Image (cartoon, grey):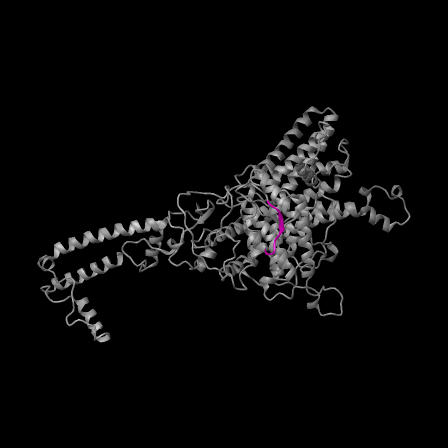
Amino acid sequence: MLREKWVDIRHAIDADEESLNGNDGAAPCGPCQRAHAFEVRTRPSTAPAEPPCVYDHPELVTEGPKARIAHLESEIAELRELLEAANAKLACCTCGAAAGVSTNASEPDGLSPSTGGSQQASAATTPYLAPGQVRLTTNSRGEFMSEVPSTASAFSMPSFGALFLSNTLVPFPGPVISTPDSNSFMAGDTSSATFDVLPSAWPPGLPPPAVLYHLVETFFTSVPLASRLIHKPTFMVALRQLPTSLDFPHVALLHAICGIASLYSPIIGDPKKEAARANAAEMLRSPSISRLRDRANGEQGTPRFAKSLYDLKDTWDEAFGVSHIRMASMSLRLSVREGDRLLQMLQAAVICTWYMYSMGFTIGVYVWITNVTKLAGPLGIYASEGFEPLSHLPSNMAFLFGKPKTPVEAETIRNIFWICYTMERIYNAGTSWPLTINDEDISQLMPCRFSDFITGENVPTHNRQRLFTENMLFTHPPLTTDSWTLYIKASILISRVRSLNSRYWISAASKKAGMSAELQGPPTESEEFRHLDQTIASFTRNIPRAFQDPVGIAVDPLLYTAHILPHVAMIQLHDPHAKVDSPNDHSAMQMLAATRAILDLIYKLSGTTYDLLYLDHSCSFGWFIAGVAIIRFLKAKIQARAEDEVVGLEQELGVVKFMLKNLGDRTFIGHRQINVLDEIYNAEIKGRTRRAATAPSATDHRAETDNLMFWNLQ
């Protein structure tokens, strides 16, 4: 009906033009003559003798041009009303037909002459969304669906320059991925419902492309080491490929990015803490077992083993980030078994480890770090060329990963290894659990500066430092030194302190066989202890002038952590030997000086408006170690009845807990460390036991195990 009325209008316009050109209206109009001529040529047997013109009517012939124009305008207005009514009815349809329909009344065929017309047509049915904003609607089943701005084509790609030059969300049509019962993942109106059209090759577990691009940008701009772990320009080019392309990023890596970016994204609601903890803990125990739930009757159902990765979709009632980390874990396990893109699997495992640490899962962090380092070993990323193990086999057969093809790939491998190294040292610094990577096995070069890495510069390697380079902790070549290399060197101090504390008696027994521990003397008098004490102090003094202030005009999260870690190493070195009740004890003085240095860094950061969420979350361990040290000194001063010093130490402990609380308001690790500090304070100062003697639940067992990482009592 709409098309017939539009044809009538076009015929009337042509007839009106002929009338204005001198035609009396008695002869057939031009369109009818052309249609009749075509019919005579194609179907001469059935063609009429004369062209029948629908506008050979007396009333139209006698009408003037102005009357005809007014009549046509009224019919156009009626046609617009019919189009608006049809579009309103179509918008309420759930068949997906509304995804590519234009509502520009001046273009009834849904075509616009320019990109601007397409954008106006899209804006007619989709309210304006700010950059990075995704509106969620509900479908007929009550599930939340993502609704994103659409361009003219359902399969159009964002501009190449926008991916590199813009930090905003590029409008991109995508699939509809429902998040069952995810009430927290909701941001906007839910009055309408639409289904977006998407290529069938899009991975079913990923968010819509608009949300995915937003989360990827959030990941690179928010996580301090994200641009070191993944070369962003190369990754963004790969992300523009079709999902079926081999260059498209692995789905496990994309799931991991979505999971950790949800902690920073403003469009992802905060998950419920207890539900997120319980679901993440369940993931560590049986990630391949699920239960089919009958939601109508509230029944959990019987357990089953999934035959496919996506058989597990829609079976959990959990938060957005936890679900993506879970799917990343499953996809990673399947891909490692098949040997599919192992370097990307290692990157995904690193991101999952970051997420587990931010969520406060101690056992989960240790398990993930172990998996990361065990995967790094077969890939051979800890070794550099010329330092391969002795073997009759060729060097390219010693490891699973071959020689890097480009300088960017070589630098990416170096960054990935050192990220694995620092994670294992820092995240396990509060435990005595064994590590996987030994310093004696590492020959990898130090990475280049970030400015050279992101631009793809080919930085020479002949003058690069290695872990065994002489005085590498005190010399900092300008062409290869930035906050990341200082971060690595500070974590090496943590590693050396840990090795001394965990292996001292073994090393002493091997050097002096048959000699008792009493004759060997205290560890503080050993040469290794004194050398390490001097090394930590020298590293702090020899930080280059350009990197001495991590809190200046802007806050450098990596440099801030690099300044905290040497003081953490000093505290851990002297903590087993410090006599805090003695004012002249060297270990106690060194321990107190390091604690006050961490407090100074806390004061500097507290004087800014910097959001603690964007720090490297491992710096919270430094704050926690300072709080534990303060509690030890506080106990000694209470016993000595030094009231003035007690008040000062109580205030300093309050500052540490204040910082951890601010971080805990954005992520779980801060609250977890505050709880452990409170338990240590109650046990040491108030003399209370940790909890009443009641039958422990499964959650209590989990919390008890997690607290082992940080509870560093003698």
Q: Is residue 680 left or right of residue 30?
A: right
Which residue is depicted at the point 72% across and 49% down?
A: 495
Residue 303 among those drawn in magenta: yes
Count the numbered circles shown: 0
Given residues 486 and 254, the one toward you in this image is 254
Residue 453's x, y, as percent?
57, 58
Position of the C terminus, as image quadrant, is top right
- Identify the magenta region: 301-308
Which of the two residues, 401 or 458, is positioned nearer the viewer here?
401
Residue 595 sits above or below residue 70 on the image: above
Residue at (75%, 26%) from the top-left corner? 639
Is residue 608 shown left or right of residue 574?
left
Q: Is residue 90 visible?
A: yes
Work out whether 638 lies above or below 171: above
Q: Where is residue 321 drawn, in percent x and y? A: 55, 47
One can see residue 604 in this view: no
Q: Is residue 517 left or right of residue 458?
A: right
Name the spot of residue 412 as percent of width and height, x first. Answer: 60, 59
> Which of the image's four quarters has the N terminus?
bottom left
> x%, y% of residue 528?
79, 48
Q: Is residue 255 magenta?
A: no
Prevailing SS of the magenta stretch = loop
Q: Nearer the viewer, residue 639 or 470?
A: 639
* Closest to the observer, 533 or 369: 369
